[in-house]
Image (spheres, rainbow, N blue to C red):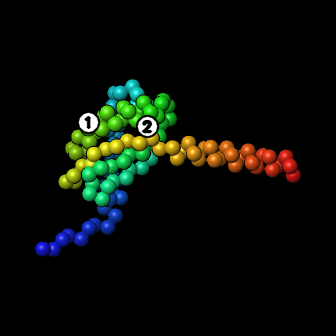
Amino acid sequence: MRHKKSIPNRSFRVADQIQRDLAELIRELKDPRIGMVTLNSVDVSADYAHAKVYFSVLVGSPDECQDGLNEAAGYLRNGLFKRLQIHTVPTLHFQFDRTTEHAAELSALINKANATRAKED
C-alpha cells in the first residue's frame, strides 16, 4: 500500500487560513467579554486535531476574553467547518499571547538603560 506524500507547507497554509477565517468569525460574536482581538498566530498539530490560537487584546481583560473565546470555540469550529475544505477541522484552544507585552517591557528597559547611560556620559 502506498501512502500519499504530504503536501509541503500544508500545515502552514491550513493554519494561515484558519487564522483569517477565525478573525472574521470572531468579529461576528456578540459576547461582551470579547473585545478588540488580534489573532497573532495559529499552531496546528500534525494530525490536525488541535489548534492553539494565540491572540492579543487591545481593550478589555485578557483572562475574560480568553474565557469567552474558549466558550465560543465550538461555535467557531462549526463556522470553520463550513468554510474550510479539509477533512478534519481542529479543536480550538485560545491562549493569550504575552509577546507584545514582553516586547513593550523590554523596550522600556532599553530606553531606561540608554537614558541612564546618556546622563553618565
Image coordinates for residue 113, horizontal then vertical, percent: 75, 48
Q: Secondary structure at mark 2?
A: strand
Q: Secondary structure at mark 1?
A: helix
Question: Residue 55 got which mark?
Answer: none
Above/below status of 13 relative to 33? below
Q: Which amino acid lies under the numbered mark 2 shown in the image of this protein?
A: Val
Q: Which amino acid lies under the numbered mark 1 shown in the image of this protein?
A: Tyr
Q: What residue is disc 1 on? A: 75
15 lies left or right of 112: left
Above/below status of 11 relative to 93? below
Image coordinates for residue 8, horizontal then vertical, percent: 32, 67
Q: Nearer the viewer, residue 24 or 104?
A: 104
- Dividing the picture into quadrants, the one containing residue 96 is top left
Q: Residue at x 47, y 44 (%)?
A: 97
Q: Residue furthest left?
A: 1
Q: What residue is disc 2 on? A: 37
Q: First in sequence: mark 1 or mark 2?
A: 2
Q: Residue furthest bottom?
A: 2
117 lies left or right of 12: right
- Dividing the picture into quadrants, the one containing residue 92 is top left
Image coordinates for residue 35, horizontal then vertical, percent: 43, 31
Image coordinates for residue 114, horizontal then vertical, percent: 76, 49
Q: Residue at x 26, y 38 (%)?
A: 74
15 lies left or right of 40: left
Q: Residues within 10 Å of mark 2 (few under 14, many from 20)?
A: some
